[in-house]
C-alpha cells in the first residue's frame, strides 16, 4: 500500500506548512523515511530523511528552515516547513524504505505552492 501524504497547499512567502506521511506495514519493518520534491521541468531532488534511530539529513537548500520528525509507533513522518520561499514550490513525495529486503515505496505526492 502506498504511503499516504497530506498537508500541502498554497502559502505566501515566509509562511509555514506541515506535511505528514503515514506508511503501511508493521512498526518493525519501516526503516528510513524521507521527503523528496520535484519542481516543474526539474528532476526529483532529496529534501530530508530520518532513520529508524533518529539520524537526520537535510538538503543544503532547506537547512535551518525545514524540520523532519517521525512517530515510530504510527509509522508516520512529518516535514515542518518554515520561512517558505517561492523556489520551494514543488510536488513533495514521501519515501519509505523497509527492512528485511522489502524495498521502498513512494507516496502519490502533495503539491506545495509558495507565492511571492
Image (cartoon, rainbow, N blue to C red):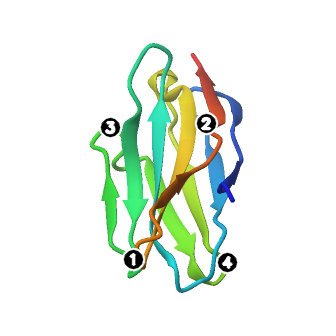
Q: Name the image quarter holding residue 87.
A: top left
Q: In the orientation shown, which residue stands out farthest toward the front? A: 101
Q: Position of residue 105 (x, y in %)?
A: 54, 55
Q: Is residue 23 left or right of residue 92?
A: right
- Label 1 close to label 4 by CB (< 8 Å): no
Give the crowd class for mark 3: few <14, some 14-19, many >=20 residues within 10 Å. few
Residue in the picture at 57% in, 31% down: 91
Q: Which mark is residue 74?
A: 4
Q: Which numbered disc flags the more N-terminal residue, 4 or 2?
A: 2
Q: Is residue 13 above or below residue 116?
A: below
Nearer to us: label 1 or label 3: 1
**Which residue, given by chain and number where applicable, does mark 3 sit on?**
61
Nearer to us: label 2 or label 3: 3
CA distance separating discs 4 and 2: 27 Å
**Which residue, given by chain and number where applicable, does mark 2 sit on?**
15
Nearer to us: label 4 or label 2: 4
CA distance separating discs 2 and 3: 16 Å
- Label 2 close to label 1 by CB (< 8 Å): no
Q: Secondary structure at mark 1?
A: loop
Q: Which numbered disc flags the more N-terminal residue, 1 or 3?
A: 1
Quarter of the figure with the C terminus: top right
Amino acid at each position: 500500500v502506498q504511503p499516504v501524504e497530506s498537508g500541502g497547499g498554497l502559502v505566501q512567502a515566509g509562511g509555514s506548512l506541515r506535511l505528514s506521511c503515514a506508511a503501511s506495514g508493521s512498526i518493525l519493518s519501516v526503516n528510513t523515511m524521507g521527503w523528496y520534491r520535484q519542481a516543474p521541468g526539474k528532476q526529483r531532488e532529496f529534501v530530508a530523511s530520518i532513520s529508524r534511530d533518529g539520524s537526520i539529513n537535510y538538503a543544503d537548500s532547506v537547512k535551518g528552515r525545514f524540520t523532519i520528525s517521525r512517530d515510530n509507533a504510527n509509522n508516520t513522518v512529518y516535514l515542518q516547513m518554515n520561512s517558505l520561499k517561492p523556489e520551494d514550490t514543488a510536488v513533495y513525495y514521501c519515501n519509505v524504505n523497509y527492512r528485511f529486503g522489502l524495498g521502498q515505496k513512494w507516496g502519490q505526492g502533495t503539491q506545495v505552492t509558495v507565492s511571492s
